[in-house]
Image: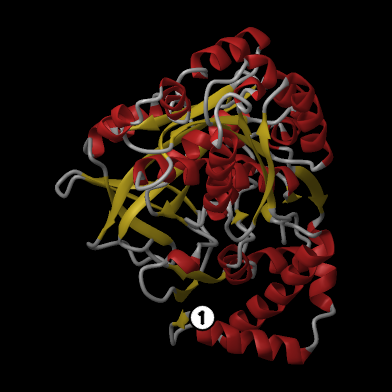
Amino acid sequence: MEYPPLRVGLFGIGLDAYWPQFSGLRERLEGCVASVARKLARPGVEVVNLGLVDNPERAQAAGREFRREDVDLIFLHVTTYALSSTVLPVVQRARVPVIVLNIAPAAAIDYAAFSRLGDRTRMTGEWLAHCSACPVPEIANVFKRAGIGFHEVTGVLDSDPVCWSEVDAWVDAARVAAAMGRNRLGLMGHAYGGMLDIESDATLQAVTFGTHIEHLEVDELSGLRRGVPAGAVAGRLAEFREVFDIQPDCAREDLEDAARTSVALDRMVADHRLGSLAYFYNGTGVAENEATVASIILGCSLLTARGVPVAGEYEVKNAQAMKIMDLLGAGGSFTEYYAMDFRDDVVLMGHDGPGHIAIAQGRTKVRPLGLYHGKVGRGVSVEMAVRHGPVTLLSVVESGGKLALLCAEAESVAGPIMEIGNTNSRYRFACGARDFVHRWNSHGPAHHCAVGVGHVADRIDKLGRLLGLETTRVT
């Protein structure tokens, strides 16, 4: 599913009374705003730069312009002292999250050069070019009194990787929030009976993330599967051989069934413009539907690798977590506790069914299974470990009529895994396996979560703040 670019609003603030008093100050500050605009620009982001806002009238107009431009996020660049009355109307009218950039033009004033200026008017003008921190408390006070949430980044315009890494994280988080609001999540089948922890309020998901929920029938996929031509099956089989490490004991009939279902899945996803999917079907003796779902794993794994994450067991919350991780560029594979290895101090985690093969350690194996434990049918499944190195776990937690985010960073490490035709990895946590499970479980998540490569907890924290969600990082 293609998402439109993130539209980032940018404006700087100043005080129009200064311009006739201090020659060149306005132009200098406008140059700083232009520099910030260049730093914000990147693929998938459109910057709406309104330049300097220096009086209340211009602030009213800027707020209306941001609304017309439909910006997703605003960066407020504090360039010098400015009245809070030139800030409040912009943000009130735009009605989107705001990041206050308390960005100085240099790491420090050149005091010797400053003293040599001699002229106190010139000296005051030079000071004003460096006093970005001055009005930030005033702005914060007014935002608090107006009930406007805000976030602040403090640093230097150039040569400050810590500052700009934080800005990048805010842009990434905003991009995820915007894409989640435009995502279409398909729900096919019904919840796995008895798993009370995975039950979820679909309306709450839509309200919180903006996600559109599309309810689907297994019958539709079965119907599409009937119409898949032989040539498409052969083509998908060839793709399977290219992408997967197919084990020699896999039956050709099972692979053909999986290829046929995979092609049909692609068609259903395209027809409904889905960006993610959760499914489960227990089976009621309708052989065609049972065959459809039994042959779904390889096709769902391909979709997940292509940015359409698929969660089994109708785990709506985890489909959302997987989508967030995928939008962060980390992947997002369906996982749960498998076992604990106290000797090596690791937690084994994995799941049956689809895996995110794009973040696998090596090629993903396809193995035949004589039965799908706890589910209908038999056929072929995927076996993989998540790429060794840094990883992040994410759970969307539902409790008390609210959603929250729970995350943790770890390392995927080498070592023996169970070769049972499932995803399976070994994760080492800084606090140790025993303490990790205690701390994670204390927050009451469902037993599923999403795992992705890289450490992205800082992005998840910022996403939670943009969406107004309580976010907890287990360390």
Which corner quadrant holds the N terminus? bottom right
Residue 49 image point, x, y percent? 68, 44
Task: Locate residue 259 relative to residue 285 in the image: left or right.
Answer: left
In the image, 438 versus 182, the foreground residue is: 182
Task: Locate residue 473 relative to residue 267 in the image: left or right.
Answer: left
Residue that mark 1 sits on: 243
Q: Residues within 10 Å of mark 1 (few under 14, many from 20)?
A: some
In the image, 265 versus 286, the foreground residue is: 265
Q: Quadrant of residue 424?
A: bottom left
Q: Quadrant of residue 252?
A: bottom right
Kind of residue at disc 1? Val
Task: Locate residue 1 relative to residue 313 in the image: left or right.
Answer: right
Residue drawn at x 55%, y 62% as measured from the top left: 354
Residue 446 appears anywhere in the view: no
In the image, 145 versus 236, the foreground residue is: 145
Residue 33 image point, x, y percent? 57, 41
Total tally of numbered discs in the picture: 1
Display colour scheme? secondary structure
Residue drawn at x 54%, y 45% as measured from the top left: 36
- 350 over 206 or under it: above or below: below
Residue drawn at x 56%, y 33% as measured from the top left: 23
Residue 98 appears anywhere in the view: yes
SS of the residue under disc 1: helix
Residue 286 image point, x, y percent? 78, 62
Residue drawn at x 63%, y 15% as measured from the top left: 84
Residue extending furthest left? Answer: 343
Q: Quadrant of residue 267?
A: bottom right
